[in-house]
Amino acid sequence: MIGLGLLGLALLCHVATAAALRLERLPAALRGTPWRAGAAVVHALGLIAGVIEKGALPLESMQWGLASLAFWVVVGAAGVRRRPRMEVLGNTLFGLGLFLLIGALVAPTGADPTRLDPLWFPLHVALILGGLLGFALSFGVSGLYLFVHRRLKRRELADLRRFPSVQALDQWNARAMGAGFVALTAGMLVGGTWALTHPQTSMGPDLTVHGTLAVWIWYAVGLYLRVVAGWQGRLIAVFSVIGFGTMVLLGLLAALFFQGWHGFGGVG
């Protein structure tokens, strides 16, 4: 498949981008934007090819859902890098995007798009992916927060000026977690409405539905502790890391035993 081939090529281009950033002999202009833009274009072409080959949006399977999520994480990482003192955070998110793209290349290929509702299902999965994107950003920010916090606690202050302040990271974490939660909630509501109005649709094993609900409850508790109980900083960062790690584990289990969410290769 041309789409998958382009995604594989995009992975190589992203890796080449990371390598180019470390080549000090190259002019500064060649170590940054051109490489990232080229890799993003190849990645986008892979998604477009997938749309043409499948005849549907790249959302009907775990494979293409992860590939889409990886694209937006990488693009977001490029935008973050342009902000002052955010280069390290951008690099962290870039690495997360590569991990998601690798996951896409080995994930289940998905179901026949004709089985899926052309309106409800893409909207459902797009919102779920939006939630995952928010949680992925929260995970990256939280990991960097814990690193900076540990350096500060040990009074290892060398080069800390390159990193965002813990206050800024804490605010970014709260915003990303909140946005992800809102999108995930909307995606679950759309999916529930779809299931109620299409009772003839087979959703496969309910375990994946319960897993998504468990993730929603986890982040709901996290936001409650943040907004109502006043938790901040390290505690919420740990909460975010555990939550996203659990989602990754659920995704792996769904891919290995159920061929994706709902038993037909979907994502939400």
Image (cartoon, rainbow, N blue to C red):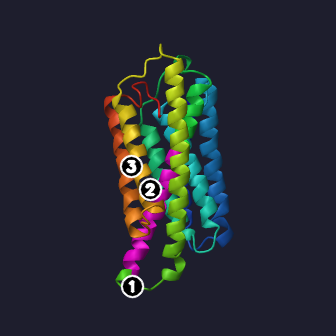
Q: Please say if 252 is above or below 93.
A: above
- Percent of width and height locating residue 251: 38, 40
Give the residue displayed 51% in from the left and 59% down from the top.
Answer: 93
Q: Tag 2 or tag 1, which sits nearer the N-term?
A: 1
Q: Secondary structure at mark 1?
A: loop
Q: Which residue is mark 3?
A: 218
Residue 26's quadrant in the figure? bottom right
Please identify the dominant SS of the magenta region.
Answer: helix
Q: Secondary structure at mark 3?
A: helix
Classed neighbour count for the residue bearing mark 3: other residues with Cα under 10 Å, few (<14), some (14–19), many (≥20): some
Q: Secondary structure at mark 2?
A: helix
Q: Which residue is mark 2?
A: 224
Magenta residues (range): 131-152
Specify the amino acid type for callout 1.
Glu
Observer-nearest residue: 227 or 204? Answer: 227
- Looking at the rendered image, the disc whose residue lies closer to the viewer, 1 or 2, is 2
Is residue 17 highlighted in magenta? no
Q: Which residue is mark 1?
A: 156
Give the residue displayed 53% in from the left and 24% down from the top.
Answer: 194
